[in-house]
Image (cartoon, rainbow, N blue to C red):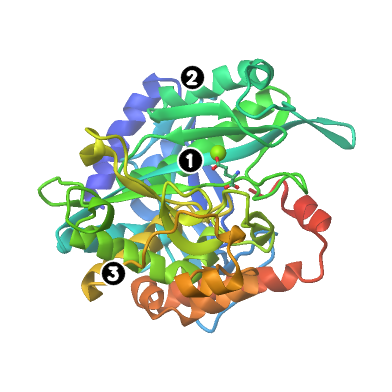
Amino acid sequence: MQDAIQQAMSSVRTLQEAGVRYVIASLVDSGGINRVKAVPLDRLVSAARSGIGISSCWNTALSDDAFTATEASGGPSGDLRLVPDTGVLVQLAHTPQWAWAPVDQYLQDGNVSPGCQRSFLKRMVERAAQLGFSVKMAYEFEWFTAREEGETLAPIHSGPGYSSAAWARVRPLAEDLLAALMAQDLEIEQFHPEYALGQMEISLGVGDPLQAADANVLLRHTVRSVSVTHGCRASFSPITIAGQVGNGCHIHFSLWSAAGENLFTGGDRILELTPDGEAFLAGVYKELPAIVAITCPTALSYYRIQPHHWAGAYQCWGHENREAALRFIQGMVGSRARTANMELKSADTAGHPYLVPAVIIAAGLAGVEQGLRLPPPISADPAGLTEAELTARGITRLPQTLDAAAEALEASRVLRSAMGDFLHDCTVAVRRAEAERSRGQSLDELVAGHLWRF
Ligand code: GLU
Ligand code: MG
């Protein structure tokens, strides 16, 4: 805490000189909504010392601004302290009077809240380190941008996907956006206009899991802000136009030894995996039905993870198989030691930026501890296989509803023990309540209801 206060004091001086007047304390709540509380810059030191107050009902907030409860959380009493991480403080390049910092959630007794998703991720990173590993991760973001023209929405481009024609439409906005992101030290790996109407995509460079998660929140905040200046609105909802492909938020990850070796290559297991690399992936593979409750957290999400959408509808893995939940990217000969990684495709833009990497690490480490093995990789499109072929190869559909995913999460001992009872119970309760509130709604109603939440 003392370090954080020192850091806040020196940051205030630097930010003041750079023209910053306000700091956005940025929380992603249990419903996956990015909430902001801003303080004037001269309050930053006090925020770093004792936090910014917010009701503890945000432990069980839903994405539609309603709340649910668990036995241990809910109701009008209780206060959380949002403590900005002054080590991550960033001046927002597009709105330079404003700086941004992610928060950790504390209790008034000075302990970290058991419901703090960002602290859970830190615990998983530490646990990996104790076992002699580090994990590298990177997110890819797809999102939708449109101009509001009266009652109707005009998508910023109408395709074709990846085309120069679509690029010409998005270029003025994209130029400002990329400049802002790069000024904020986010490493851009790739950018392109994507396949669906008004869709764009950015892939960020690889970092440690906490960096990747913070970057996720910062990127989306910046996209929204730049879009508004261009007279547009941006949406990271899993599906923004019924009938179009959805917005994925695929996550790439790799496991590294303490000596700095990539354990997803150079070994004697299938596709050159090392034993620890394979066991980590087998742990993730095994927990996929429960993980999906975190990576596809809304009722709408299940309209996205459909066959033939490259969205990971089946619990299987494959070498560069874009229809598998887990697509193994072995990389080019000569660069594998640096680049071999796994991509989880059954993940959308409503997924909690901190919970997603945390549950992947938790499941992977359980796989290592249990020495799990992967089933054979699949190269076919699972949707093209007969029931008998699917059964023979042990391939099943991932949960097809939020109810089914919530049930898998509730039953997951691995994730309960990693998350702790409090966070696990809150997360399951939120998923169940989201499913309940969406019950009976048509796809069009779900799309409209979720459009401007994420
Ligand atoms: N839009 C697809 C999704 O919902 C992903 C397409 C791609 O692989 O780029 O995940
Ligand atoms: Mg894409």
Element at badge 1? Answer: strand
Residue 131 visible (yes or no): yes
Which residue bears the numbered disc 1? Answer: 140
**Mark 1 CB near ligand 2 (8 Å cut):** yes
Q: Residues within 10 Å of mark 2 (few under 14, many from 20)?
A: some
**Residue appearing at x 20%, y 47% in the figure:** 262
Which residue bears the numbered disc 3? Answer: 373
Q: Nearer the viewer, residue 229 or 356?
A: 356
Question: Could you say which disc has been placed on residue 179 in the image?
Answer: 2
Figure quadrant, ligand 2? top right
**Position above or below: 368 against 378:** below
Distance from disc 3 to disc 2, alpha carbons, whole Å, reads 44 Å
Q: Position of residue 62 (x, y in %)?
A: 64, 64
**Residue appearing at x 56%, y 56% in the figure:** 32
Q: Position of residue 15 (x, y in %)?
A: 38, 26
Say left or right for 154 vs 192: right
Q: Nearer the viewer, residue 158 or 322?
A: 322
**Residue appearing at x 76%, y 52% in the figure:** 447
Instruction: Please identify, in this view, whether the residue under mark 3 or under mark 2 is nearer the observer.
Output: 3
**Residue appearing at x 44%, y 58% in the figure:** 378
